[in-house]
Image (cartoon, rainbow, N blue to C red):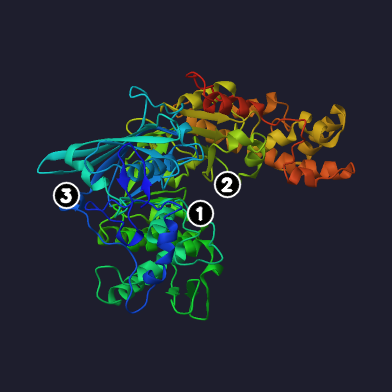
Amino acid sequence: MITDKPDDLQELKPAPALASAQGHVESVSPLQSDLTNSSADESAPSDGSTLGIADTRSTRARRWSPLETICVKNFKATKEASIPLRDVTILVGPNGCGKSSVLQAIHWAARSASYVLPKNTKEMISFERLDYVPSSDPLTTLHNGEMKSDGSSTPVEVIFTHRPIAEEVTQATVRIRAARNRGGITAYMDGGSAVTPYKQRYQFITAYIPGLAGLAEKESILAQPTLRRQAASGDAGGVLRNILLNLRSRRVNETDDTQGKERLRRLNELIRQVHPGVEINVSFDEREDYHITASISTISQSRPLETAATGVLQVVQIFAYLILFEPKVMLIDEPDAHLHPDKQERLIEALERAAPEFETQIILTTHSPHIVRAASPSARLVWMRNGIIETDDDDAIRRLLGWGGLDKAALFFIEDEDDKPLRAILRQWPELFRQISLCRCFGIDNLPRDKFLRGLLVDGELKVDAFLHRDRDFMTAEETEKWCRSFKTDRVFPWVTRGCDVEAYFCESEYLVALFSVTFDEANHWRNAAAQSVTKARETFLEKRKAVVRTLWPNGGSPNSETMWEEAGGKTPATVKGKALLAALKVEVKNSKKDPKLLDGFTIPSNFEVASDLKNLIKAILEPVATIKAPSGF
């Protein structure tokens, strides 16, 4: 007889009888694997054999009410996040915000709890014995620290709050600290009768799907403890065929394979909701086969399962886990990673239909606007940032999603339809640019007004910063200040170009000198000659001034535009639109035997910086410093 030695000694039984009175199933030690392997043929799916283990849980252990919230504290990137749940809950937010940390913590807590014996409140579990650890160095997963063993130390904590029954709120709390020898963890549980369903190893309370990189080339029949251990780890690549075979086969309490066939049929039905025309088949002949055969069929052909696209395999894994293990909570990390947008939308629709059917609550993380847009109003959206919940206001999240603001630190509303010159400028500072979502407004009249920006408020505040670009369009310094002051919403930062528009930055003498290695005299000669060649410059100047006067001086009092033109010297580089000046400059550059294509591509020399005024504004707002007053737009 093989024994394991936690705090309380418990006897491990041979594989066919691994379920105790509470359904408490232990994984198999290396020595015991000889016993289980010898019975592999008895587990093969033939007319007289079964796969799976018997459900011997008590009535109390089977009792389950849906979860209302799950609160994760002190784990990796997550400081404290209380996730409100529905049948389907979608976590959104930028990289590093704690979305994946939430899923890992929930799964780790649930799997650790399953090792606690029914009458105990804690269990010391070695890392070798745990079927899931969230890191190669689990004790360092404490938020901003390292786990310790003493009872007063900060634990990783997960609180499962169930929907009230007869107005009584029930909670199961799992706390994880380092074991005394630091070779494992100690899981502590409290919550009265609410903890009973967690203290069993027959049913997976949680199933975790972090993504599937591909399949093992071959799979042999695995003993149930080995299969369940690897499936619980989240790594299905080496056991997906076994999972499909178990799903298809007769279970311990079934008289024939009718229900197995129905499970496979249902699996294919769910898969086809995402990938139309696809069907999965699995077989194993215990008299002839050493490896499990699994195939994927379409209308035109059938081929081995391992040749299927990763996006197809991940969908197969999700629904196979759902049908075989029937988890109470399914945790899916970024299922959109390998799916076409159309398939992403199909997947969330299929998951929403499947969740109530299988009495499962699904929590998934995503960066995909397609998944969020396709989710029905009954799905819960939760926006995370910096390890905490920003909001679970569905309407606000959907509004921000439309501008691409959910996984960015700032929205940048730009006046122009053509954003190429501004993108060229922002690419100079990749660390800043990665935090920004560009929103083209197709003209100054479409640039958001203050009232519109207030519509993006979440819980009374703008949760992302908003930059507003406006071309100067020959405004005076006073007019520029006046326009910037018209925005009263907090965290809104206007930016007015130094010249008349963004293209004017690429017409400045300093830029031309750096780009073409010419003297300032030659660069200025190009600029003046180009300005003189621009047609209708005066008309354009006066039209732009009319728009400025209409917006900023509705009651009169504006400077005289004709006088401004004359005082500026008439047609000069300062009174010509940058777009027109840049086009004329290309002719001058070509006439000087230089390459005008450098101007076409808004090329920026490595030793030169364009629009440092914009960089200074963005850095002041986005970098983690003390509260800063917004610059005035210059």
Q: In which quarter of the image is residue 370?
A: bottom left
Q: How many labels does the image show?
A: 3
Residue 449 position, x and y percent, is 43, 35
Identified at 55% across, 40% down, the residue is 415
Q: Mark 3 points at which residue?
A: 60
Q: In which quarter of the image is the C terminus?
A: top right
* Label 2 CA crowd tier, 10 Å (few <14, some 14–19, many 20+): few
Q: What residue type is labelled 3?
A: Arg
Name the amino acid type tagged 1.
Ala
Say if residue 464 shows up in the picture: no
- Residues 256 and 3: in front is 3
- 65 versus 33 height, above or below: above
The numbered mark at residue 143 is none
Is residue 326 in view?
yes
Q: Which is closer to the viewer, label 1 or label 2?
A: 1
Q: Is residue 355 above or below residue 524?
A: below
Q: Nearer the viewer, residue 456 or 593?
A: 456
Q: How far apart are marks 1 and 3 (CA)?
A: 39 Å
Position of residue 562 measured from the top left corner of the image (x, y, whole percent): 63, 29
Q: Residue at x 38, y 51 (%)?
A: 27
Which one is earlier in the sequence, the residue at label 1 or at label 3? 3
Q: Which residue: 59% across, 37% down?
A: 433
Crowdedness near tag 1: few (<14), some (14–19) or many (≥20) residues, C-alpha within 10 Å: some
Q: Label 1, on which residue?
A: 337
User: Mark 1–mark 3 contact, CB under 8 Å?
Assistant: no
Residue with the most extreme right position: 593
What residue is shown with label 2? 417
Residue 469 x, y percent position in the rendering = 55, 34
Q: How far apart are marks 1 and 2 (CA)?
A: 30 Å
